Image: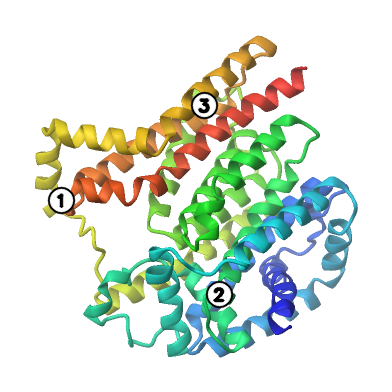
Amino acid sequence: MAFACLLVISPFYLLGLGLLGITPLGNRLWLVTSDSSETFRGLALLLSWGVIFNFGIFMFSPAITHSVLTGTVLSIAGYILNYRFAIELLKKSFTLSPPPIVFALMIIALGVQILLHPLQEWDARSIWFFHAKFFYFNGSAFSLVGWTNPNYGFSHPDYPVLVPALASQVATVVGNWNEYLPKASILLMLIPALLLLSSYFRKRWSFVFLILMQLFVTLKFIDNGLMDGLIALYASLALLELAIAPLSKFKSLLVVSFFALAVGLKNEGQLLVLSIGLAFLISSLRFQKFTLRMPRISIRELRIGLLTILLFVPQVLWMLHVKELGLKNDMNLGMSSVSIILNRLTDVHSWILIGSSMFVKSHLIFWLPIFWLITKAEQHFGRVLGSSRIFHLFFAIYSVGLIAVYLSTPYDLKWHLSTSTTRTTLPLLLAMSGAAYVRLRNIDQNL
C-alpha cells in the first residue's frame, strides 16, 4: 500500500519542484494553452526539471532522509506559490482529449512491465542499482563506505548517479530494499519522455510507428534496469524537438532539459549531447530555410534558459565528488590512449570487428532497407522536407565518436564490442527511426 501511494504521489512531488523552479518568472500561464498537446509539452518540461532539482537536493543534503523531507517542503512551496497556475495546468491535463489518454495507456502498460520484473541484468544489479544500495545503506551521498573500496571497482563507481540517487530515495521512503521497488525510479524517469511522446499524437500511422520504435525497441533496455534505453530515448526526443517541433517556447527549453537528463544518466550522455549539438549547428548553417532556426527568445524565455543551466549543477557536483574521492574511469582516456589508437588505425582486423559489431551484429544494417523504402515513398507522395537531415548528421557524428571510443579502449577489442554495441548503438537506431518518422509524417500530411 505504501509503495502504491508513493507511485501516485511521486509525479506530483516532482511537478511541485518543477513549479518552484519557474516561480521567479512571474506570470506562468504562458505554459498553459487550450491545446492539450502543448500543455503536455509544458508538463514534460516541468517534470524533467523536477527530476533534476530533486537530484540537486539529494547532492546538497547530508542524508537521504533529509533530501526527501527538504524536497517535500520545497515541492509544497512550489504549489503554494503557484497555486492558480498549478490548478489551471492540472485541469487542462486531466481531460478526455487524446494526449492524456495515450499517456495513461503508456504509463500503465510500461509500469506493469517494469515493476513486475526484478532486477536481473548484471549491469543493472552490479552497477546502477549497486550504487543505489551504497546510497541506501550508507544513508547519504557522501559516505565513503564502498565507493573507494578496490574490491568494488567492478561497479564503476565513477559513473553518473541520477537514477541510483532516485532509487535510494524510493527505497528509503518505503523502508526496505528489494529487487523490485527501486525500479520505480526508472518509471519516474520515463514520465517526461512519455508526456512529450503523447504530445505528438495525431490520428496517423506515423504516430503509431513513432511509439513502436521509440518505446518497444527500447523497452528491453529500460525494463532490465539499464540506463541505455532511457538515454537513447531522451537523445532521440531531443533530436525530434529540434527537427519537427513548432517554433514554440518549449522547443529549446525541452532540448536543454533532456541534455541535462542525458549527462546525468550515463557517461555516454556527454558524447550524445556533443553529437546532437554539432548536428544541429551544421543543420542550421546549411538548411536555414527549413524549420531548424532557433525561435526568437523573449526576456521570460531567457530567464528560463538561465534557470535550465542550474540543471547541470547536480551532475557537476557529483563529478567533483568523484574527483575528490580519486575515482578513475576504467577507460583511462588520455595521452596513453594515443598509442592504442595509432596501433588500431592501421589494423584492418580492428576495423572489421568494429564495423561488423556496430552495424551488423547490432542489426542496424537490417533496418536500412526499411528506412530507404520510407524515403522513396516520401519522394513519391510529397515534397521532401529538410528536417530529417539533423538525424543523418547525428548518425554520422555519433558513429565517428563511438568508433573513436572503441579504437581507444584499453580492453580486448573483441570482448568490449561484444558486450556493449547492442546498447551503445541504440541511439543510432532511434535516430534512423526518427528520420523515418519525419518522412512518414510528411507522407501522412500529403495524402
Q: What type is the residue that disc 1 sits on?
A: Ser
Where is residue 292? Give x, y as percent: 59, 32
Task: Say if 434 sits above or below 134 in the image.
Answer: above
The label shown at residue 182 is 2
Left/right placement of residue 440 relative to residue 435 reads right
Placement of the N terminus among the 4 image quadrants: bottom right
Q: Considering the numbered disc 3 on the image, is that residue within a helix, a strand or a loop?
A: helix
Residue 218 location (% of width, % of height): 54, 48
Of the numbered discs in the image, which one, if any, rests on residue 337? Answer: 1
Label 3, on which residue? 389
Tell me which numbered mark, 2 or 3, is placed earlier along the sequence: 2
Q: Does dot 2 land on a helix, a strand or a loop? A: helix
Does 199 sit left or right of 209 as displayed? right
Disc 1 element? helix
Q: Amino acid at mark 2?
A: Pro
* Residue 259 visible, this orientation: no
